[in-house]
Image (cartoon, rainbow, N blue to C red):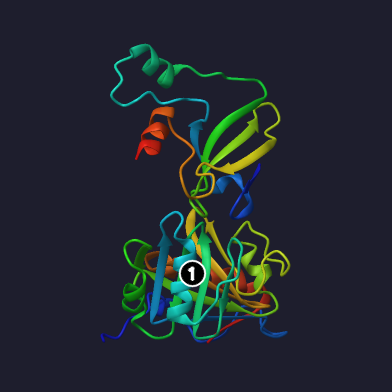
Amino acid sequence: MVERQSPLEPEFHVGSHGNFEHGVEIILTETRPGSIVQLAAWPGEEKKLIAAIRAVTGLALPDGAGGGLSDGVKSVFGFAPGKFTVADEAEGLATAFAKVVTPAIGTITDLSHGRTTIRIAGPKAEWVLAKFFAIDFALPAFPVGAGRSTTHHDIFAQVQRTGADQFDIYVFRSFARSFWKALCHASEEVGYEVQ
Amino acid sequence: MLITCPYCGPRDVIEFTYQGDGNRERPDPASQNFEAWNAYVYDRLNPAGDHNEIWQHSGGCRAHLKVVRNTLTHEISSVAFVRGDHGRGDHGSAARRKAEDKA
């Protein structure tokens, strides 16, 4: 496989930045999953699609809007009725799904090269993200594993909570560098480290 | 103004796009009843109070929603998917529904 280049590279400066004299409260990384796919079930076929997700990834989606989970390697969450985002550290997720998600069940869209995944972690992650997204980041409203589909500055983003103070943000690859720079600026006040 | 999307929960109005008056009944595309077409395109109830509207959660789950909004207070009294159960559509013209039933 061809080595994938990060769109963040010119602005990706490893190390501590901003106001970090009193400690770093934000860790920013790019998770670079090998595969990102979006799955959509035809109306009435949602249960079959959820079963297919379980068959391919081993992850059993919880009930409810925006429900999801992550095992650290693979992640899945709902972002719209009957629609799911699945990411895997390994490549080939779309091929694996093509074997089980038949055209009668739904569609598979391979976004591995179309999205960039940025991870923000640390005690001030909710605080920094609240500057971008007008959604409730409190743990009871946004539990671990759950996903949210929302916008920053009118541009789409999907957010999955992968830890009590950790979020993975899926942004358009073409907007990723701009978002990254904005995220760095927003993190400056609390001190951040790029890893 | 907050709209409580049935999928995403309460979200700011900037995430939504107004898709028009929800009271309109689109004539059959083959219809040559010009009065019906004129009414569909131009006639509006313009109520001072509760108003049926179609909104899309374009900055979120992208679902189309049936919203009842009070034009005096902006209070949203009801939000539902246009496709009731995300199964069989319950919106659109009576003619379309009839055609679906036949199929």
Residue B11 as seen in the image, left or right of residue B23: right
Is residue A102 toward the left or the right of residue B73 in the image? Answer: left
Q: Image quadrant of residue A162?
A: bottom right
Give the secondary structure at mark 1: helix
Residue B49 sits above or below residue A175 on the image: above
| Observer able to see residue A112 | no
Q: Dot 1: few (<14), some (14–19), or many (≥20) neighbours within 10 Å?
A: many
Quadrant position of the N terminus of chain A in the picture: bottom left
Q: Quadrant of residue A176?
A: bottom left
Q: In x, y percent, where is residue A160?
A: 56, 71
Residue B43 horizontal/vertical position (percent): 47, 16
Residue at image coords 34%, 40%: B103
Q: Nearer the viewer, residue B11 or A44?
A: A44
Looking at the image, residue A139 lies above or below residue A156: below
Query: Does A108 appear above or below B55?
Result: below
Please name whichever residue, A61 or B7, is drawn nearer the observer in this view of the structure.
A61
Q: Residue at left 40%, top 37%?
A: B101
Image-based side of A73 in relation to B100, left or right: right
Count of marks overlaid on the render: 1
Is B24 drawn above or below residue A144 in the view shown?
A: above
Residue, far left: A2
x, y (%) of residue A10? 39, 78
Q: Amino acid under label 1?
A: Ile
Residue A80, x across and y down, in percent: 51, 58
Pick out the residue farthest to the top: B35
